[in-house]
Amino acid sequence: MQGLFIEQDAGVHLVIRGFVALLGFWTAWRSGKSAADSWSGFPQVVGYTFLIAWVMQFLHHALFNGPMLSTYYYAVDFVLLLAFATAGFRIRRTNQMVGSYYWLYEKSSIFSWRAKH
């Protein structure tokens, strides 16, 4: 995902770059959902995202000859992946709370719940 919006690619490289980005976003989403499924806290989501961002940086280096150790690109990858992981975590946790404790909570949005009155 490094340089996804900066570097100029055409043809097959663009398709592969898009596939790698989708793979990273899907993996982050599933890791956030998985942490919520095991009733783990949000720090576990951050840890998973840290590892996924490192793997994405390696994939970009291996597939597109990008820099292996770039703080800027790692930070961009981490922030984007953390957004997807957080969304997966919050949506699943909201459904858990509303489904498991239906007499106490109701959905206030797709990402949150509130106490019933």
Image (cartoon, rainbow, N blue to C red):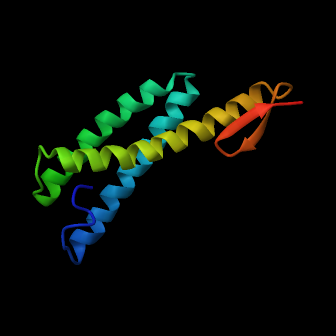
Q: Quadrant of residue 102?
A: top right
In this view, the residue in front, 95 or 70, is 70
- Outermost residue, bottom direction? 11
Residue drawn at (54%, 42%), measured in percent from left and top? 88
In the rendered image, which quarter contains the N terminus? bottom left
Point out residue 106 in the picture as x, y percentages from the top left corner. Answer: 80, 35
Q: Residue at horizontal 29%, vertical 42%?
A: 53
Percent position of residue 81, x then y: 38, 46
How many numbered tags mark residues here? 0
Q: Position of 75 compared to 28: left or right?
A: left
Q: Residue furthest right?
A: 117
Left or right: residue 55 versus residue 90 is left
Instruction: Measuring from the top left, give residue 111's x and y in whole percent.
Output: 64, 42
> Looking at the rendering, which quadrant does residue 99 occupy?
top right
Residue 76 percent coordinates (x, y) = 29, 50
Q: Quadrant of the C terminus?
A: top right
Question: Which residue: 41% across, 50% down?
Answer: 25
Examine the rendered structure and indicate whether residue 2 appears above or below residue 102. Answer: below
- Left or right position of 36 against 54: right
